[in-house]
Amino acid sequence: MKENAIVREFGAVFIIGMGWPLPDGVPEEVRSPGYDDWNLNGDIIVQNFVTEYRHELSSQGMRVNEESLMAQLQHVGRLEDAELPYFKALLDGKLPLSYGGGLGISRIIMLLLRTGHIGEVQVGVWHDAHFKQAAAAGIDMIPDRIIQRRKRHHHHPKEN
């Protein structure tokens, strides 16, 4: 992955234009065509010290407008999605333009505490196979449920 290589070299980068394919035609990352305008977004990426993998701290940008939504839907071959309620309202001019993004607090905590999985700093809903895989890798995730059930003791009132 090119993002891994660049954060290894520079430590931290801000990448603009996430969503469109790179010059070699390979998409760096699959992005929703109906969220950010891929021409007006960017990610702050650093290297995770534990995994030595790219670690996204922030994704931010202008949300899609009518023009960018249609261009991005066309690019991913999903023009039929323009009929979905949210996209239709946007295309009909019924929604305001907006900006979004910010710092991922859990991702910053991961970096500061030097953890390798977001499940070590926040509760998430993970399937059992993921818990087992994490445990096998030595990752102590915060459980989203009680793993072992206790036996219930039924108390019956004493008869007189």
Image (tube, rainbow, N blue to C red):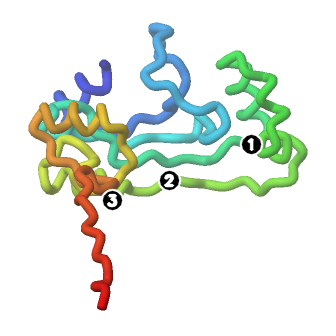
Q: Quick one: quadrant of the C terminus? A: bottom left
> Which mark is first along the chain, 3 or 1?
1
Percent coordinates x, y for residue 72 in the rendering:
68, 26
Provide the secondary structure element on which disc 1 rests: loop
Q: Residue furthest bottom?
A: 160
Residue 36 is left or right of residue 139, and the answer is: right
Q: Which residue is mark 1?
A: 65
Label 2 sits on a secondary structure element that is strand
User: Between residues 151 and 73, which one lies in front from this camera angle?
Assistant: 151
Q: Within 10 Å of the Cα at label 3, are there few (<14), some (14-19), or many (20+) other Cα atoms?
A: few
Name the residue beneath numbered marker 3: 105
Residue 43 image label: none
Q: Residue at x 58, y 40 (%)?
A: 40
Q: Nearer the viewer, mark 2 or mark 3?
A: 3
Q: Does residue 106 appear anywhere in the picture?
A: yes
Quick one: 127 or 47, which is closer to the camera? 127
Residue 49 is left or right of residue 5, and the answer is left
- Mark 2: amino acid: Gly
Residue 108 in view in this figure: no
Q: CA distance from mark 1 to mark 2?
A: 16 Å
Residue denoted by label 2: 101
Whichever of callouts 1 and 2 sits on the residue coming sooner in the sequence is 1
Residue at image point 82% right, 43% down: 85
**Splitting the image into 4 quarters, where does residue 109 fall?**
bottom left
The residue under label 1 is which amino acid type?
Asn
Counting from the top left corner in percent of width and height, residue 52 is at 15, 32
> How far apart are the two marked residues, 1 and 3, measured between alpha carbons?
28 Å
- Could you classify mark 2 by the number of other residues whose Cα lies within 10 Å: few (under 14), some (14-19), or many (20 or more)? some
Residue 104: percent from the left, percent from the top? 37, 54
What's the residue type where badge 3 is placed?
Answer: Ile
